[in-house]
Amino acid sequence: MSAALLSVRDLSVTFTTYGQTNAVLHGVCLDIPAHSQVALVGESGSGKSVTMKAIMGLLRQPPATITAGRIFYDGRDLLTMPDRERLKLRGTAMSMIFQDPMSSLNPVFTVGDQMGTILKYADRRLGRSRSRRERLARVHEVLAQVHMREPERVASSYPIMLSGGMRQRVLIAMALLSEPKLLIADEPGTALDVTTQAQILKLLKDLVTERGLALLMITHNLGVVRETCGYVYVMNKGNIVEHGPTAGLFAAPREDYTRALIAAVPRLTGGTRFGRQNEVRP
Amino acid sequence: MTRPMLEIADLSKSFPVRNAFGRTVGEVKAVDRVSLRIERGCVYGLAGESGSGKSTIARMIMGLTPPTAGDIIIDGESVVGRGGRSGVKAQMVFQNPGSSLNPRRTVGQSLSVPLAAHGHPRDDRQRRIGELLEMVQLPADFSQRFPHELSGGQKQRVAIARALAVAPKLLVLDEPTSALDVSVQAKVIDLLVDLGRRLDLTFLFISHDLSLMRNFAQEVGVLYRGRIVEAGDTARVFENPQHDYTRLLLASVPVISEEEERLRPAIPLIDGEIPTAEKLLALRQGAAGTETTTEVHGS
């Protein structure tokens, strides 16, 4: 599968804590073709965040050990390339949108300062340079792209001066700063109200399709998967249980786990049966 | 006509807004003349986003916050002005079981607190604790465990057992499953439905999760900025929402099937974006500014 922008092959990860070794990922395979939106869905403890961290190179080793597998980005193996090379890709070719807007922003610097710093170091890694003023102009430009009405005012604000939805937009803007090809979103909008979450998801979808970006959406919410991604991988206990086009997989899941998971999701149309204790739950 | 389990009439709560010198310069109406009634054995869903006043209503029912005006009648008795004594009739289950259980107490100790407070005979407490754990389908030896040894779903079961300790008639559930995985959530709701039937309980279910509410509550009230903007039979409100805020909420729910998508109302987009509640309501009142409304979001 050389066509995929990102390709994870047989990835196995173990964690060693207090002298005990536990296998966390068991040969995970997934492919993200260029310009496509793919979701990785699973419940807590399924290994979706570990997979994401392994892709971004954020796994702390130890306690984690990557025991087997390869991760290809654009045909190059991320796990065997020199650290300097990998650093050049991180935050520039592939970047992340984090979940919790409040804890991912530094409260003592303005949004513009933080974004400027990110841009400065991204430029340095790529051997580019631009002046302070050019950087600020780029920050304003990106803030406008995430539909901020007054980018100048937002850039000079501290995080606490912004609402939750605006902070999430700032995080999206940060990820877009150096025009990555692959965005990895970790549960964006889950900390927000449902109407704000809908706005954020629509914005993300529009940005990704307009620019032809690839998106890996990490989430536990099956509804979010269907709203944003055409293809889905379902994960449980460190294994990919099932994958396929979202609409088809949700309509006719093949595996027992997926079936039980989908049955547990309450439907807006009603008809989800509760109170039958003996029913199979995942 | 039977007596409702809970009746709230014109309930209001305002909080003073103070300036830097501590002088009151205004007030925020957190809850604004809310009225609702819940029949015995029913599940009433109170839907709203953050800041809508839903938790303030719960706190007033439980006597944790005194109302500014209005009355709360639980099973025929007014609980307003009784110094936080909604007594044994109403109990509450909180959102985050991780922080509502004392980490230094075993499950058994946590469960014995309400028993002691309500004068349950000391020599019978162990038996009652075993009974409560069985009700929430936990093994009896869990009474020796500490909260950190339990999973999220197990902790929430303990919180439910604690609420049931004094045999209440009304349970106020404040987002009881929002911290849980969907499969665990389903099991906790299974348990609540089952307990409701067995113990003849009435539920006030407070949540922002409309899909869950559709399947759990028979009646719903939609709260926006301290006011109930729409209320009624769950199926009717969901299938034929009358208020724009209800429509916006429903249109925002991420769904997993086409049938659900068809149920979602269409919402006009403002400048290509899903509007905020304020903007949508302003638009409908004809007070829109220079924004252009174009496409329609929804089914």
Image (cartoon, coloured by chain):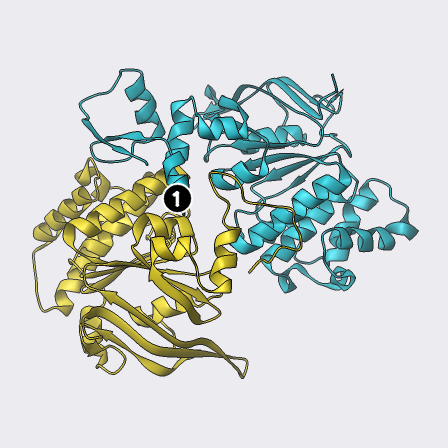
Nearer to the camera, B259 or A37: B259
Q: Quadrant where the C terminus of chain A lies?
A: bottom right
Q: Which residue is mark 1?
A: B254
| Chain B palette colour | cyan
Q: Is residue A36 above or below residue B230?
A: below
The picture quadrant where one finds residue A140 is top left
Q: Is residue B142 left or right of residue A123?
A: right
The chain drawn in yellow is A
Q: Secondary structure at mark 1?
A: loop
Q: Is residue A50 left or right of residue A205?
A: right
Q: Is residue B212 above or below residue A78?
A: above
Residue B222 visible (yes or no): no
Residue at x 22% of width, y 81% of height? A81
Q: Is residue B237 above or below residue A78?
A: above
Nearer to the camera, A160 or A208: A208
Residue B207 visible (yes or no): yes
Q: The disc labelled 1 sits on which kind of residue?
A: Pro
How far across and down, in percent of the image, does residue B177 sit?
Answer: 56, 47
How far across and down, in percent of the image, does residue A45 sit?
Answer: 49, 65
The picture quadrant where one finds residue A38 is bottom left
